[in-house]
Image (cartoon, rainbow, N blue to C red):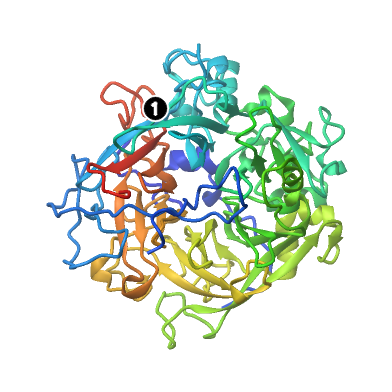
């Protein structure tokens, strides 16, 4: 049996079922980082979305759209049974611009709960067709052939790109599959070939043309549009950059080491100023069997550092394809853990795995233009005690959309320098309690340590190819700062400051593990925190930076929490920050993953400027067992991906723990949701 309040014994409020399928129970195992390296204690409404880019015209940085003027009245607090709910926060006469909505209270409602004055709608969900002639979703009649042309499972990253006057291109990552939630009568010990092939097809990426509604903020998919595309584990991807073709990337099926079938566990992402989409491959390790059979010390250490171990995998894919068996194809895991670049406008293009950006568990890949016109890409490695990275291209971004500019930008991410961050606090040792030091801030300075540029390695004892293939070990060697699961990272389109979501790390300060430092100031950090980073001269090409802890998440009544100095009686509780986005007012929006406070995950707005700095307000919550992903904020709507609804231990197709989004008698389906105000306002929301 399951209970809605089911919580795993791991880092957060995730269910054990989610821990099993999403990351292979990473938090139940020892952290892969066993190194002994040191650690140290109103924008105009007409602006374009930070998740939008111009397909034509001058190349610009991704800029935030004007946020909704989110107004709303008060209502009684609700915790169950209502799809609108407001909190019991201490009365406040005003809110930060862009956050003027009635705050949603923490709750356990099996729905997407939104503020009063707003409407919502499902845009697309698992199994919905993208192409004409494809059958509608039927959990009892799914086939691999149909799934390859349907919307995939467990949508995560979400963005909208310009396409037409009343249409957009929506790009979405499909991170992982939850077989117990997908297949009636599923036997984990004996999956069928058809079930495995459906799961292969349900992973990957989707490009979906969507039509804008005339009178509200709703969207609907355009089935059969020529730009629609599904990329899955059978799609071809090209390895590019300095490591492409290396002997450790060669397999029986690909002796050249340049063509990979599939992309796995795609989590966060980003949009480039030249109109392409970046997708990060994250927990790829769980898909490969028989790492325990490897005894050669160097190879065994490399596998262990990336969390590969054991014999059989949970999904048993190795029974149906030798490439998932390390004993038979030892180099196949090296072909995953990269940043993938996709051209959404060309459905015939081959996506690229950019080796110059390094190989690790990529949560995100967010670009920003440097002061001299190059591009920097910020990346987090989502593992306890792992690192924060930046890549800076050698060449400048070519302006325009002519053939020459497109050719130059097409290889821009193949040449540049990869760095890892070292954070230094300015107040000496911290005690791990979260109590602020005497200067009133957890803050300090930092440096970007170069790891590799092209064929030049800056790491003793490692070649350039080895640094790119085994980036974690390279960062260990140079003394990077061990962080509390750096997930999404987002440069502000308004200020240029960079924000890092550190989701949690309950092992901080445990016996034999790294203790608290000023950049990770709480031991047993189950609620996570957010860091604000300012690079020298506000230049993404700089090699030094300042930083401060913006949020120490959790219950505002907990003395270890901190909300940038704002009155904690006027903020929403927030736990386990994950994905980030900006609105046009400069507010940071945070979606959560694994709320450890006993309520459902949600989406929160956070003011960053003026007297409201630190004001956190919950805008929505998601159904039973679900995680909030995406998000996307623009003038017409707020959008989120609702990932793994109903994923509660003991749940199955026969015994669902949620009936969202289709209602009683249905199985839960991951889906994209749009929320918009009931009344349109002149000039926008």
User: What is the residue that sits farthest to the left in this orientation?
Assistant: 76
Is residue 242 in view from this perspective? yes
Label 1, residues with CA under 10 Å away: few <14, some 14-19, many ≥20: many
From the viewer's side, name the closer residue of 615 and 684.
Answer: 684
Q: Classify residue 471 by image quadrant.
A: bottom right
The residue lying at 35 percent from left, 32 percent from top is 213
Instruction: Tell me the element at label 1.
Output: loop
The residue lying at 44 percent from left, 38 percent from top is 17
The residue lying at 54 percent from left, 54 percent from top is 62
Taking the image as shown, residue 625 lies to the left or right of residue 446, namely left
Q: Provide residue 172's location: percent of width, then percent of height.
A: 52, 37
Residue bearing the label numbered 1: 652
Q: Provide residue 285's location: percent of width, then percent of height.
A: 64, 42
The residue lying at 72 percent from left, 70 percent from top is 449
From the viewer's side, name the closer residue of 554 and 606.
Answer: 606
Taking the image as shown, residue 157 lies to the left or right of residue 421, namely left
From the viewer's side, name the closer residue of 318 and 378.
Answer: 378
Q: Provide residue 515's location: percent of width, then percent of height.
A: 54, 72
Q: Provide residue 138's location: percent of width, then percent of height.
A: 41, 16
Is residue 292 in view from this perspective? no
Q: Classify residue 265 by image quadrant.
A: top right
């Amino acid at each position: 049996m399951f209970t809605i309040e089911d919580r795993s014994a791991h880092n957060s409020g995730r269910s054990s079922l989610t821990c099993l399928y999403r990351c292979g129970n990473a938090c139940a195992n020892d952290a892969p980082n066993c190194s002994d390296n040191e650690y140290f204690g109103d924008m105009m409404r007409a602006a374009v979305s930070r998740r939008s880019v111009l397909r034509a015209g001058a190349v610009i940085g991704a800029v935030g759209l004007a946020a909704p003027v989110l107004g709303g009245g008060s209502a009684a607090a609700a915790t169950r049974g209502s799809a609108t709910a407001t909190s019991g926060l201490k009365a406040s006469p005003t809110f930060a611009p862009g956050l003027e909505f009635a705050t949603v209270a923490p709750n356990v409602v099996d729905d997407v709960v939104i503020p009063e004055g707003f409407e919502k709608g499902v845009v697309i969900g698992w199994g919905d067709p993208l192409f004409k002639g494809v059958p509608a979703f039927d959990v009892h009649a799914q086939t691999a052939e149909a799934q390859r042309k349907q919307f995939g499972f467990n949508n995560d990253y979400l963005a909208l790109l310009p396409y037409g006057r009343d249409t957009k291109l929506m790009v979405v990552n499909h991170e992982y599959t939850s077989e117990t939630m997908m297949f009636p009568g599923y036997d984990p010990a004996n999956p069928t070939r058809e079930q495995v092939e459906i799961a292969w097809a349900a992973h990957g990426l989707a490009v979906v043309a969507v039509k804008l509604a005339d009178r509200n903020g709703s969207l609907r998919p355009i089935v059969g549009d020529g730009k629609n595309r599904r990329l899955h584990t059978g799609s071809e991807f090209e390895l590019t950059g300095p490591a492409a073709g290396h002997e450790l990337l060669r397999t029986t099926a690909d002796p050249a080491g340049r063509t990979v079938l599939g992309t796995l566990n795609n989590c966060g992402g980003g949009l480039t100023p030249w109109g392409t989409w970046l997708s990060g491959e994250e927990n790829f390790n769980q898909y490969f069997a028989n790492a325990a059979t490897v005894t050669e010390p160097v190879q065994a250490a490399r596998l262990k550092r990336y969390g590969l171990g054991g014999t059989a995998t949970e999904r048993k894919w190795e029974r149906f394809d030798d490439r998932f068996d390390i004993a038979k194809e030892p180099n196949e895991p090296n072909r995953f853990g990269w940043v993938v670049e996709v051209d959404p406008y060309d459905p015939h293009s081959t996506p690229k795995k950019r080796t110059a950006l390094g190989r690790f568990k990529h949560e995100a890949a967010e670009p920003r233009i440097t002061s001299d016109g190059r591009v920097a890409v910020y990346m987090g490695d989502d593992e306890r005690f792992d690192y924060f990275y930046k890549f800076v291209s050698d060449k400048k971004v070519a302006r325009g959309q002519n053939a020459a500019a497109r050719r130059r930008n097409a290889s821009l991410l193949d040449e540049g320098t990869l760095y890892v961050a070292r954070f230094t606090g300015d107040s000496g040792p911290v005690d791990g309690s979260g109590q602020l030091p005497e200067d009133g801030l957890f803050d300090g300075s930092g440096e970007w340590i170069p790891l590799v540029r092209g064929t030049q390695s800056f790491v003793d004892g490692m070649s350039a190819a080895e640094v790119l293939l085994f980036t974690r070990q390279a960062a260990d060697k140079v003394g990077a700062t061990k962080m509390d699961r750096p997930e999404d990272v987002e440069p502000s389109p308004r200020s240029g400051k960079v924000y890092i979501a550190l989701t949690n790390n309950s092992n901080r300060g445990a016996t034999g593990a790294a203790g608290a430092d000023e950049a990770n100031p709480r031991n047993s950090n189950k609620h996570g925190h957010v860091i604000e980073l300012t690079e020298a001269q506000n230049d993404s090409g700089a090699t030094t930076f300042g930083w401060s802890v913006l949020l120490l998440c959790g219950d505002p009544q907990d003395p270890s929490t901190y909300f940038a100095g704002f009155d904690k009686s006027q903020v929403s509780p927030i736990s386990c920050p994950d994905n980030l986005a900006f609105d046009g007012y400069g507010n940071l929006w945070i979606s959560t993953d694994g709320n450890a406070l006993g309520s459902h995950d949600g989406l929160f707005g956070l003011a960053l400027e003026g007297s409201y700095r630190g004001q956190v307000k919950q805008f929505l919550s998601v159904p039973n067992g679900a995680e909030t992903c995406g998000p996307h904020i623009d003038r017409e709507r707020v959008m989120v991906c609702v990932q793994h609804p109903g994923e509660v231990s003991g749940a199955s197709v026969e015994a669902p723990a949620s009936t969202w989004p289709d209602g009683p008698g249905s199985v839960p389906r991951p889906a994209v949701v749009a929320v918009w105000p009931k009344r349109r306002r002149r000039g926008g929301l």
